[in-house]
């Protein structure tokens, strides 16, 4: 059939035609419905793929399995977009069944559970184990990460960083985020992890030290987790202020790098990069989930390694857990 084709070429042809059969755990949730599934529908134009939803609610108009009844042997990949306390169980089950996994951040609700996932991933090293941290894939943030050396040269010696994701909206629809037993914490765990991950990617997690941390919650908030957190880090001799909050008076989402020669700002809300107040790069839309899922599929096909790893998720979780210990001491 493939007369004259070498084994290497034949293998490449087979990989090119690889079908991706994916289970979406938590597939009826807000994230899956509004970000993951639309992105997969777009990517179906590039990749042969089929997906099914796995959830605890026993009804859906899409292809659906109730959790615990999904036919694991019929699928080769799993996307885990469930509450944090379920990540370890699902990840280990999927890996043990020979599946590749893409796990939402934070990697889990505790360091112990995260370690279990890492241990399983190392046991099945031939399978892709990737972290989904969509802030690292946001266009403006990705632009700065990829071109940090150039931007750093323009702003000079770094003197301080302020990173804020403060939202006027509450947590309606995802109240479980404020249930510590399910999430591991409140906004520091949910949103603070994103900002710590950006610092870790830029400067190395080994350089991050938590100096102070403060957590609180707005009156009448659901659950018992914090709705506001202020985490003060040192990265070498550079002070870093991280603020995250829900139900705030106004919304502010940006990261500002202050150097001795100038200022670099990532406007997360508008997807813009500004240098000394002048816009340098602007993006029309946040296509981070399409990029994440494309990277996942390409990693499964062996065309590139994952850009975000479970190990990074574990390191970010260590920083956040340290912040909680300091805040509550």
Image (cartoon, rainbow, N blue to C red):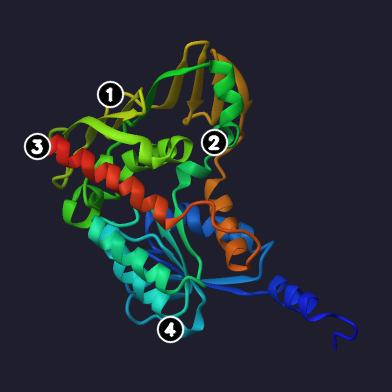
Q: Earlier in the sequence, mark 4 or mark 3?
A: 4
Viewer-side label of 4, 3: 3
- Circle 4 residue: 71
Residue 57's label in the rendered image is none
Dot 3 corresponds to which residue?
329
* Residue furthest bottom in the image: 1
Q: Position of residue 166 (x, y in %)?
A: 33, 30
10 Å crowding of disc 3: few (<14), some (14-19), many (20+): few
> Is label 1 in contact with label 4 (beta carbons under 8 Å)?
no
Camera-near label (1 vs 4) is 4
Q: How many marks?
A: 4
> What is the x, y in percent for residue 36?
49, 57
Residue highlighted by disc 2: 145
Foreground: 266 or 328? 328
Give the mark toward the camera: 4 or 2. 2
Residue 172 appears anywhere in the view: no
Q: Quadrant of residue 165?
A: top left
Residue 283 location (% of width, % of height): 61, 33
Q: Which residue is mark 1?
A: 249
Residue placed furthest toward the right: 4
Q: Is residue 177 left or right of residue 64?
A: left
Residue 293 left/right relative to 72? right
Residues at marks 3 and 1, CA–CA distance in whole angstroms = 28 Å
Q: Secondary structure at mark 3?
A: loop
Lower position in the chain sequence, tag 4 or tag 2: 4
The tag earlier along the polypeptide, 2 or 3, is 2
Of the image marks 1 and 4, the number of the one nearer the N terminus: 4
């Amino acid at each position: 059939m493939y007369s004259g084709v070498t084994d290497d070429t034949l293998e490449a042809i087979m990989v090119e035609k690889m079908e991706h059969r994916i289970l979406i755990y938590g597939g009826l949730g807000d994230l899956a419905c509004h970000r993951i599934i639309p992105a997969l529908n777009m990517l179906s134009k590039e990749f042969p793929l089929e997906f099914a939803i796995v959830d605890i609610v026993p009804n859906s108009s899409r292809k659906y399995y109730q959790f615990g009844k999904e036919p694991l042997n019929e699928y080769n990949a799993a996307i885990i977009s469930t509450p944090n306390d379920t990540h370890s169980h699902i990840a280990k089950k999927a890996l043990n069944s020979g599946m590749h996994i893409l796990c939402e951040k934070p990697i889990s609700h505790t360091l112990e559970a995260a370690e279990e996932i890492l241990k399983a991933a190392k046991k099945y090293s031939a399978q892709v184990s990737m972290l989904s941290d969509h802030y690292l894939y946001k266009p403006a943030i990705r632009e700065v990460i990829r071109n940090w050396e150039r931007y750093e040269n323009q702003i000079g010696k770094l003197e301080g960083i302020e990173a804020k994701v403060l939202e006027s909206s509450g947590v309606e629809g995802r109240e479980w985020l404020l249930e510590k037993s399910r999430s591991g914490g409140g906004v520091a765990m949910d949103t603070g992890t994103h900002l710590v991950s950006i610092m870790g990617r830029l400067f190395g997690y080994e350089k991050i030290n938590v100096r102070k941390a403060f957590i609180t919650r707005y009156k009448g908030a659901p659950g018992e987790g914090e709705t506001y957190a202020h985490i003060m880090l040192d990265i070498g001799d550079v002070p870093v202020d991280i603020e995250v909050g829900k139900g705030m008076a106004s919304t502010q989402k940006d990261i500002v790098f202050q150097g001795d020669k100038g200022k670099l700002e990532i406007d997360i809300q508008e997807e813009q990069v500004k240098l000394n107040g002048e816009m340098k790069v602007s993006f029309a839309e946040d296509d981070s989930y399409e990029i994440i899922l494309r990277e996942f599929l390409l990693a499964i096909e062996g065309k590139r390694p994952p850009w975000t790893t479970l190990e990074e998720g574990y390191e970010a979780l260590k920083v956040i857990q340290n912040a909680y210990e300091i805040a509550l001491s």
